[in-house]
Image (cartoon, grey):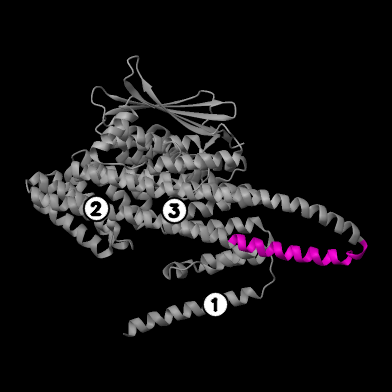
Amino acid sequence: MLLIGACLAAVAQDSLQINRTRDSIRHLPNDTAKVSLLIKKGRAHSRYFDAHKTENAFWQDALTLSQRLKYPRGQSLAYNELGTSKRNKSQYILAEDYHEKAIKFAEEANDTNLISFSLNNAGVDCRRLDKLQLAFDYHLHALQLAEAIHDVRNICVATNSIGNIQLTAEKYADAIRHFDRALQLEENNNNDLGVAINLGNLGYAYQGQNKLDLAIQYYKRSLAVNQKIDNPTGMAICYNALGAAYKEKKDYVTAMDYLKKALVVNDKVDDKVHVAESYLNIGKLLGAQGKHEEARNYMQQSIDLSTYWNFKSMLMDAYKALAADLKTSGDFRKSMEATDKSLLYKDSILDEKSSMALTQMQAIYEVDRKDNQIKSLEHDKMVGELRTKRNVVFIFSLVVFLLMAIIGGLFYIRHRNLKTNRHSLQLELRSLRSQMNPHFIFNSLSSIHRYIWSNNQEEASDYLTKFSRLMRLILDNTQHTFVTLNKELESLRLYLDLESLRCNGIFDYFIRLDPGINDEEVLIPPMILQPYVENAIWHGLVHKHADKGILDIEIVLNGRSLICTITDNGIGRKKAMEIKERKGVMHNSVGMKVTEGRIDLIRKMNKNKEAKVTVMDLEDAAGQATGTKVIIILPAEFIF
């Protein structure tokens, strides 16, 4: 009770101190020095706000003041701090949004050092989100800017990050080249932590090339530096890496020695996930030696610790390893039980990621809404000041003002009517587009349900993982009225791959793009082709038994029109309708109906009479159905 009371008293004292600090700063003049002080105090008290899971009030105050002062450098610094704080909590989507804002304001401030720093931050966010190409682009841009001004710190960060991206992509030679350069820079800069990190990374790269002896040398050098600076986390990472390398060399005695050292040093690390990882690694090593009973004891210790601390990723891996060990021992019933638990945690992790992504998107919306409110208030204030000045000369310009007001009023009414009509069409189009999400998700979930009943759980789980990737892409694309053609085709290919997998490869598909089209510049409404592709598969190709189905998608640019042709060699609409009638199914395609409505609205908004959909039945010389062709003509839209 005394300890609890002391803790509560300490928390109250910290809260009181923070409130006093904010009050004292609030009375200072509103200038750039005050912004810098707020950011500095935010760093000093960041642990308090993290522990209470609340936004850092100092950084929020710094951001608001910078907006009022029109001080872009302060806005960039505040957004960088907020983004890094979110990244440390694994809220990578929100972190990326904040760091993108930081880049924008750093560029507005024309501060090259700050631009490079912000680009590196955004690159790290994208790497955590597996957006490797975008991460590479951010870091490469940061490196180029940092080299131009000889900014060693950002050169080191960018070079190391590019190496990590190449390591993830298994481009080991390129990764080694970048890690070597980063290592030399860190050594010249006397940064022991940076030296230790790059030595370890070089070890991973050489292990990827199967140069185990060389990898072990670098792990040991990294371990020596971590021991020198007394970095228990770094030591634990090195011990685990050495254990894995010696296990790969089948030197199980040495591997066990290093893994047990990792277990000991992990007691000094606050994050107990590393302890659970060490138990699991030892269990896997014992299992590889055929010591299954002892291996399962260590795996169970990892499971118990992970259950206590709710380490779901570790529980998924531990149960998967336990299932493999039980299967090797011939205990198939318990192996299946462990597999079920591993899949359960895998599904739980996917649900949490989806929920977290939704929460972060909502937070981004709230931040943008708040920014717009501040801008609106500033705008209203400016308008008020201008109105006051205008009243001084109102008498002398009354006649001219009235004349201009009448003319302007006529133009305003005309513009308002046009804008209202267009806005009405946009709302109707957005309504139709939003109907595609539940329609597509319902059909896809039905597909997953059938796939689970016809396949084993592991394959079904992998199918669900691919489906979640498609959902993320679809939900991202359908936030916009138009998306680039390459993004739409990426989601279409992923959808076709999933449908081909579920249909046991009964059809092949081909997507042909006019060589004259730059798919990164041409825009297309999202989800505009998918309903027709889905209809071709499920009403034409799945009923075809004579030979393999072919689905051909061709996109060409003709003047200001984008012509998309979808051709299948299925059974044709007439036979498809006969099959539906025999089965008593008279369901009309919601997706196609909604899409036709969207195209009709696009035609009205763009005043393009050529925008339309044409469906043609294909026949051979004997009049027998040979498939269906759908031609979709859309107005061509471009980014520039």
Check disc 3 and give the amino acid type. Tyr
Residue 389: within the magenta? yes
Assess disc 2: are there few (<14), some (14-19) or many (≥20) residues with their C-alpha within 10 Å of its C-alpha. Answer: many
- Residue 625 location (% of width, % of height): 32, 22
Single out the mark in the foreground, 2 or 1: 2
- Quarter of the rendering containing residue 308: bottom left
The residue tagged 2 is: 316
**Label 1, label 3: how far apart the Cα atoms are:** 30 Å
Check disc 2 and give the amino acid type. Met
Dot 1: element = helix
**Label 2, label 1: how far apart the Cα atoms are:** 43 Å
Q: Main secondary structure of the magenta part?
A: helix
> Residue at the location (16% across, 52% down)?
338
Q: Which mark is residue 614?
A: none
Quadrant where the image shows the C terminus: top right
- Upstream in the sequence, badge 2 or badge 1? 1
Residue 214 visible here: no
The residue tagged 1 is: 19
> Residue at the location (27% across, 45% down)?
448
Q: Are marks 1 and 3 in contact (CB under 8 Å)?
A: no
- Upstream in the sequence, badge 1 or badge 3? 1
Dot 2: element = helix
- Residue 630 location (% of width, % of height): 43, 29
Query: 604 above or below 10?
Result: above
| Extreme residue in the left direction | 330
The residue tagged 3 is: 92
Residue 568 visible here: yes
Q: Which residues are magenta?
A: 371-396
Check disc 1 and give the amino acid type. Asn
- Residue 288 location (% of width, % of height): 15, 44
